[in-house]
Image (cartoon, rainbow, N blue to C red):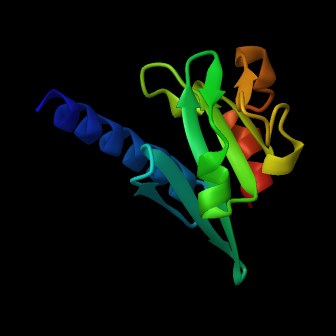
Amino acid sequence: MLSEGKHHAEKIMKEKFIQLLTDNGIDAEMGITPISEVYIMHLENDGQTRDFWFVETEGDIDTETTNFIRRNIEEYIFACVKNEDYENGKYMIGKVKELSGYGTPDGIKEDVSFMTMSFAELVNELK
């Protein structure tokens, strides 16, 4: 039951994030893959579709690359968000293959200093 409550809270946070993007002219939706609760963000813009592997963090990122490979996701968004405050979060966006540690058994390990974009910069990048 506890994990169900956590999942519900995360769903609300995702909806808030998508709403913020929508308010800024980004047509997006977010789904979840059952592999290990990885969020996939789906964007449609001028007839072009882009899918991102999306992870929230308040610091260190420690993840395994199998999620990228199984979903064949080429791009990522990392979000460093505290207390659901997406507008003041820090973001990083790019190609999965360019990530430090991608394709290694250790996966990817980065810290908050890896995040370089503001929410406004993220929005501009996605438009």
Residue 92 falls in image quadrant: top right
Q: Position of residue 51 (x, y in %)?
A: 64, 63
Q: Position of residue 80 (x, y in %)?
A: 61, 25
Quick check: 121 left or right of 67?
right
Q: Is residue 59 above or below residue 120?
A: above
Q: Residue lying farthest front?
A: 105
Q: Residue lying farthest right?
A: 98
Q: Residue lying farthest bottom?
A: 47
Q: Residue lying farthest left?
A: 1
Q: Residue 17: in sight, yes or no?
A: yes
- Which quadrant would the C terminus be assigned to in this image? bottom right
Q: Position of residue 84 (x, y in %)?
A: 43, 28
Front residue (pair 95, 16): 95
- Which quadrant would the N terminus be assigned to in this image? top left
- Tell me the residue at 75%/59% (across/down): 74
Front residue (pair 122, 35): 35
- Tell me the residue at 74%/54% (across/down): 75
Q: Is residue 93 above or below residue 45?
A: above
Q: Is residue 50 above or below residue 68?
A: below
Q: Position of residue 89 (x, y in %)?
A: 61, 26
Quick check: 55 left or right of 48?
left
Q: How many marks?
A: 0
Q: Residue 25: in sight, yes or no?
A: no
Residue 56 falls in image quadrant: top right
Q: Is residue 55 above or below residue 76?
A: above
Front residue (pair 123, 97): 97
- Tell me the residue at 57%/38% (across/down): 55
Residue 104 falls in image quadrant: top right
- Tell me the residue at 78%/16% (across/down): 113
